[in-house]
Amino acid sequence: MNNKILEVKNLCFSYENFSLNNLNISLKKGTFVGIIGPNGAGKSTTLNLIAKLLKPKSGKIILFGKDIRKLNRLEIAKLISFVRQDFNPAFEFKVKDIVEMGGYHKSRSFFSNCEDLTKIKESLKIVGLENFENRSFSTLSGGEQRRALIARSLYQETPIILVDELTAHLDISHSIKIVEILKQLTKFGKSVLAAFHNINIAAKYCDYIYALKNGKIIFEGIPKNVIYKENIQQLYETEVEILPHPTKNYPIVIF
């Protein structure tokens, strides 16, 4: 039985001087899968293709057994939410308004609106922002803003969450807090596919990793099986050392 809820099959895409070539990626229910690689490798492009924000040159993206080309925007919005680090609203919004944006695909009635208000509060509570709903989004710290975007994704109520380098430019405390929230969500059946800038965070939290370089997957697997010196040096073209964590079962990359 095929228990993959997302399958990327031989996906190709190109623009200007960049191309993605024959990508094959899959995601199972309740798993945390990471995409690692240097800047410009195609991590964000891959997520944009899966979210149907870009059109592939060839290949297929299968979502719950359906070709994504046959799904409209509202149908996709019920299955995939996309949390991006470059979210910059043009106007001033309260945190609760940002979260509510995740419900644009939902039908509206008086009773559903009452229920939705409760769900907004619940989503904010899960990410630790229950006291921030009336705060202006622009006044939040970078880490708080990204947690609010995760809350928006929770309110969208999708089984799959795409995450684009959400820990970039954050201190280690905020980075860990965000990834631990995402990891916890997989224990409740959510599936997360995330692009990572920080390879050590990916190694610690991901169930499976795809390494992308120049638009191609050069290795993949369980972190402890594929994060070793030769692989990482090939991926980033720099000298590294790999050490085992002294008390936990994951590798640490030292650049």
Image (cartoon, rainbow, N blue to C red):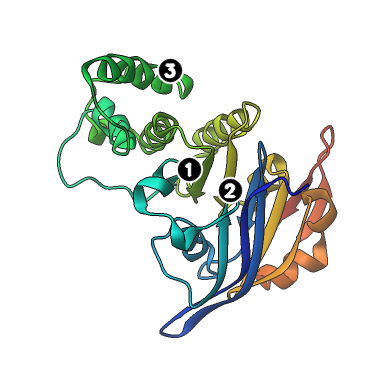
Q: Residues within 10 Å of mark 2 (few under 14, many from 20)?
A: few
Assign a secondary structure to mark 3: helix
Q: Which residue is mark 3?
A: 125
Labels in figure, total: 3
Query: Going 42% across and 70% down the picture, which residue do you hit?
Result: 55
1 vs 3, front mark: 1
For the C terminus, the image quarter is bottom right
Amino acid identity at mark 3: Lys
3 vs 2, front mark: 2
Asked whether the beta carbons under mark 2 and mark 1 sit within 8 Å of each other, the answer is yes
Report the side of 98 relative to 60 (left or right). left
Amino acid identity at mark 1: Leu
Q: Which mark is residue 205?
A: none
Q: Which mark is residue 79?
A: 1
Residue ranking furthest to the bottom: 17
Q: Residues within 10 Å of mark 3 (few under 14, many from 20)?
A: some
- Image location of residue 115, percent across then percent down: 33, 15
Query: 33 or 238: nearer the eye?
Result: 33
**Residue 87 can be seen, yes or no:** yes
Query: Going 65% across and 49% down the picture, which residue do you hit?
Result: 27
Assign a secondary structure to mark 1: loop
Amino acid identity at mark 2: Phe
Q: Which residue is mark 2?
A: 64
First-in-chain label (2 vs 1): 2
Q: CA distance from mark 1 to mark 3?
A: 22 Å
